[in-house]
Amino acid sequence: MSEFDTVIKGGTVIDGLQTPRFKGDVGIRDGKIAEIGSIPASRAGNVIDAAGLVVAPGFVDLHTHYDSQVFWDPWCTMSGWHGVTSVVIGNCGFGFAPCKPADRERAMLSLSRNEAVPMETMRQGMPWDWETFSEFLDSVSRTPKGVNMMSFVPLAPLYGYVVGLDEAKSRQVTDAELDRMCELLVEGMRAGGCGLSAQILGVEGNVQLDFDGTPMVTDLMSERELRAFSRAMGSLGRGVTQMTGPLETAGFIARESGRPVIWNALLADGALNQHGGQSMSHADAISRLREMNESEGLRVFAQALTTNFGSEFTLEDYNLADAIPCWREALVGTIPEKITKLADPERRRAMKEVDEARGGLFGAGYVLQDITVQWISSDARNAVHLKDTYEGYTIGEIAAREGKHPIDAMLDVAVAGDLRVGFATVLLETPPESMRDLLNCPVSLPGVSDGGAHTKFVTTGRYPTELLSLWVREHELISLEQAHWRLSAYPAMAAGLKGRGSISEGLSADLVVYDPDTVGSEPMERLWDYPAGEWRLVQKSRGYRYTMVNGELTFVDGTCTDATPGRLLRHGTD
């Protein structure tokens, strides 16, 4: 019998701990890293030749929304394609547990807009074999997985379960209700939740809204409620908060809980913030983070957006314009209602004023004229004529040709195509000097992948690959050693994820083996692989030779092996 199940031989090992790289072999037994050094091939049941390749710990993605997708996609792609071996769900206060059976439709409605997960896909793809948070974790545990998964206890479902989402928006919760929600938070953490999560964006400038265009329930939380939740988590002496909102709110939670906070999001100046208006420059944010951590005795990490931002979108289901009242009002409702509103000259007049006043589509830095009509669905009315006339042209070209305002040019095409028209933005490229600041911030964690969310608009789940290829290989902003630390060991430590994130003897064998000269992202494409025949926008990867989860290969040269060795990770024990 072989001493090791697998030996990865002759690779350049970057262990995720900022140790200088070295040539060596990694021996794996029973899903764990058993030995690092020089290991004869004769001691292995299987040998992976890693000559000329980098051997590194699998990536840890702290900010995903795979809460539903894991039930139909065990590898949580895009993350699985890009070397991610552990993901954390339940972010931003959004999730599906606890949830009474009568409230399931309402819970899915919220996620259908604020994270843009297709409604019918959720209906068909989720087993809904739970009510409590503990039962939800048990369901995730039973589900075959190609990645490891840990979960926050999101706060919005607690409001839904105890008070009712709509009722909780209309009044202040009682002391008894708040006490019960805090009890459920503690129960959820004892079942394995890694802490609490919440979106606290308020009312103005918020693009993560409920299905009806109103704020999410956690956006309306009072200081009293937030203090109670923070102290309840802190009473356990473990756990971490993930929050999306003002940096000073992150400081408040850290003070009240005595526990670390992962704040979303640290953005380079001029970057698109899909979660609302950017309130401070990245230099000011980094300076404030230093004060909190170094002077005030707090522990506040920052998830940093480290991908250049390009997107495609349709007005059939777009929600990232919700910070603009006239756009939000027009894009809420059924498809026929949206078509009627988008054709209305009075509404268009308000949209034109916003575009001209703010210097870009939805105020996001996109010049409307540069947006391209990328595709028009074949089942749209007059599809053949529309495709021949508009596909591949920019809004500016169409407006000039037809003598129209760009807003009219864009909306006329969208309405004529029953809103099944795909528009593509230009890529918003972050200056390398700004990205250098983000990547070298002492408490920044690369990511904000939003994996599983906004899948018809953005592909930020490629962030590990873009960090290695663009920011390390091309621009040399940080070393590979630091990149792998920030991609694996550092986020694992920040979230309290034990036994993972580095190549160390005794740790789980979550590994990637890749070619540093070719690793990169493939072009965007649409895949029709969701339940109910829904499509999503993806970018696959290249250059990853092997991805291993708990000692088993999940991807070889970009092809899934169909293995599902992933585990539910229960915080406090795993």
Image (cartoon, grey):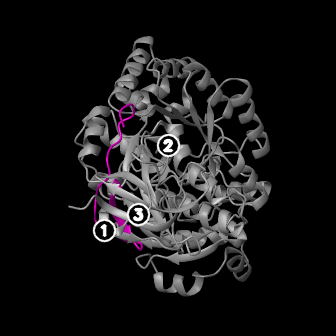
Q: Amino acid at mark 1?
A: Ser
Q: Which residue is mark 2?
A: 492
Quadrant in the rendering for residue 185: top left
Secondary structure that dominates the magenta span = loop
Between discs 1 and 3, the one toward the N terminus: 1
Q: Which residues are magenta?
A: 549-574
Q: CA distance from mark 3 to mark 2?
A: 18 Å
Badge 2 marks a residue whose secondary structure is helix
Q: Nearer the viewer, mark 1 or mark 3?
A: 1
Q: Which residue is mark 1?
A: 42
Badge 3 marks a residue whose secondary structure is strand
Q: Answer yes or no: is residue 447 visible.
A: no
Q: Residue at x 43, y 41 (%)?
A: 90
Q: Amino acid at mark 3?
A: Thr
Q: Residue at x 36, y 51 (%)?
A: 34
Q: Answer yes or no: is residue 90 visible.
A: yes
Count of marks overlaid on the render = 3
Q: Amino acid at mark 2?
A: Ala
Q: Which residue is mark 3?
A: 547
Cβ atoms under marks 3 and 2 closer than 8 Å:
no
Q: Where residue 438 appears, x then y in whole percent?
A: 71, 50
Between discs 2 and 1, the one toward the N terminus: 1
